[in-house]
């Protein structure tokens, strides 16, 4: 049996439940949170737990994951001094890791290209490349990826975790439920009326920690 990285015995609040699962080397686990205004909040909480920033009594972190951060750039910098692919990697990746050069085999951009000119899918793979260069075990999302383009990014991750890695995808879609090691779906513990109130902000979303 492959090395255990994370053991989740179940995360429960009064509103929802994230069922138990284990993440081991070679696994690609999908946590399906459904779409809605709750998604970003729940994703952030899960990322904080899986990266070791926050503690949850039912989640044992043997090896913390690295989150593939979305590329962000201020308006001022984007206009007057936009980041290039090369400068982004220098700041965010281990440039001595051979993993970094793989991104140029998969996508056609170069180190001199401005990151702002890459499409959403290319930016996502760039951030994933940076994350994988520092840690073979990552957590990521597919924010901004269209149905036409997410498959290339997903295959990129699947290929990388073959090298003693592992990944958790936190997603709002169940399109990939049959193409992963484990599919974990959120279970709501409140009725539809309460969920509508959570969605419109009249009821706060409960915290995991």
Image (cartoon, rainbow, N blue to C red):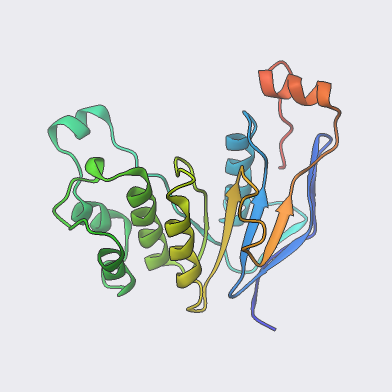
| Residue 191: quadrant of the picture | top right
Left/right placement of residue 197 relative to residue 156 reads: right
Give the camera-side residue of 119 and 69: 119
* Relative to 80, 91 lies left or right: right
Furthest residue toward top: 202
Q: In the image, what residue occupies the spot 34% across and 49% down?
A: 123
Q: Residue at x 14, y 37 (%)?
A: 81
Residue 164 is situated, as x and y percent measured from the top left of the image, at 52, 78
Q: Can residue 28 be seen by looking at this rendering?
A: yes
Residue at image x 85%, y 36%? 189
Compared to 196, does 29 lie above or below? below
Against 129, residue 112 (above or below) is above
Q: Which quadrant: the N terminus?
A: bottom right
| Quarter placement of the C terminus | top right
In the shown orientation, is residue 72 left or right of residue 190? left
Image spot of residue 101 (x, y percent): 26, 69
Q: Give residue 116's position: percent from left, percent from top.
A: 24, 40
In the image, what residue occupies the spot 22% across and 53% down? Answer: 85
Task: Give the answer, above or below, for where 32 lies relative to 158.
Answer: above
- Say if residue 52 shows up in the picture: no
Corner quadrant of residue 2:
bottom right
């Amino acid at each position: 049996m492959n090395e255990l990285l994370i053991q989740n015995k179940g995360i429960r609040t009064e509103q929802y439940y994230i069922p138990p699962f284990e993440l081991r080397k070679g696994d690609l686990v999908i946590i399906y949170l459904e779409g809605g205004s709750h998604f970003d909040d729940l994703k952030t909480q899960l990322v904080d737990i899986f990266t070791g920033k926050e503690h949850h009594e039912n989640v044992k972190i043997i090896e913390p994951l690295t989150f593939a951060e979305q590329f962000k750039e201020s308006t001022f910098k984007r206009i007057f001094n936009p980041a290039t692919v090369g400068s982004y990697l220098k700041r965010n990746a281990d440039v001595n890791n051979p993993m970094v050069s793989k991104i140029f085999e998969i996508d056609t951009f170069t180190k001199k290209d401005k990151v702002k000119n890459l499409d959403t899918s290319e930016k996502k793979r760039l951030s994933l490349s940076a994350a994988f260069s520092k840690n073979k075990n990552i957590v990521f999302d597919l924010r901004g990826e269209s149905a036409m383009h997410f498959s290339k990014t997903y295959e990129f991750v699947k290929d990388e975790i073959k090298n003693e890695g592992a990944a958790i995808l936190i997603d709002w879609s169940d399109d990939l439920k049959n193409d992963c090691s484990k599919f974990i779906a959120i279970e709501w513990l409140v009725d539809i009326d309460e969920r509508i109130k959570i969605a419109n902000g009249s009821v706060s979303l409960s915290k995991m920690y």
